[in-house]
Image (spheres, helix red, strand yellow):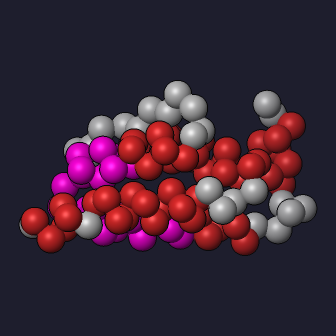
């Protein structure tokens, strides 16, 4: 259990680092998804972002990871990395990008 909790900080750093490599519109959409997703995960505290600042995102991810049950931590970590990859690899002409941009 201590090994898992000791992994929280590097996991939060890794997710934040990869997320902030996204172009700004994709980063915003990923962070919107993250806030929504975190509120749906049973047994955890939802992430609330006041700004899309990298340091704040990393701190919020760390706190959120710490609130997760140990058996869900690795799963959520892989899910977040997969979601970042999905936004990164999404075709620029995808309606997922354009419907979100025009809806704001």
Q: Which residues are magenta?
A: 61-83
Q: Is residue 88 left or right of residue 78?
A: right
Q: Is residue 46 left or right of residue 20?
A: left
- Residue 88 in the image, given as x and y percentages of width and height: 70, 67
- Residue 78 in the image, given as x and y percentages of width and height: 42, 70
What residue is shown at x 79% (from left), y 31% (from top)?
Answer: 104
What residue is shown at x 37% (from left), y 64% (from top)?
Answer: 11
Q: Is residue 66 left or right of residue 50?
A: left
Please tell me whether the stretch drawn in magenta is mainly helix, strand or loop.
helix
Looking at the image, the residue that sits furthest to the front is 55
Q: How many marks?
A: 0
Task: Tell me the quarter of the picture where residue 5 sits.
Answer: bottom left
What residue is shown at x 26% (from left), y 67% (from top)?
Answer: 7
Residue 20 visible, this angle:
yes
Q: Is residue 52 left or right of residue 90?
A: left
Instruction: Between residue 21 and residue 95, name the one nearer to us.
Output: 21
- Residue 4 in the image, given as x and y percentages of width and height: 19, 67
Looking at the image, the residue that sits furthest to the right is 93
What residue is shown at x 62% (from left), y 70% (from top)?
Answer: 85
Instruction: Between residue 67 and residue 60, name the one nearer to us.
Output: 60
Vertically, is 38 above or below 103? below
Vertically, is 61 above or below 56? below
Is residue 62 magenta-colored?
A: yes
Task: Tell me the quarter of the picture where residue 100 sits.
Answer: top right
Instruction: Between residue 16 and residue 93, name the one nearer to us.
Output: 16
């Amino acid at each position: 259990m201590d090994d898992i909790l000791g992994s929280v900080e590097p996991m939060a750093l890794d997710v934040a680092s990869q997320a902030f490599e996204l172009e700004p519109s994709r980063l915003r959409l990923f962070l919107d998804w993250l806030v929504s997703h975190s509120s749906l995960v049973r047994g955890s505290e939802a992430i609330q972002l006041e700004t899309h600042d990298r340091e704040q995102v990393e701190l919020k991810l760390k706190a959120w990871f710490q609130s997760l049950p140990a058996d869900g931590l690795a799963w959520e970590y892989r899910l977040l990395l997969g979601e970042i990859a999905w936004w990164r690899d999404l075709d620029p002409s995808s309606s997922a990008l354009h419907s979100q941009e025009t809806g704001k």
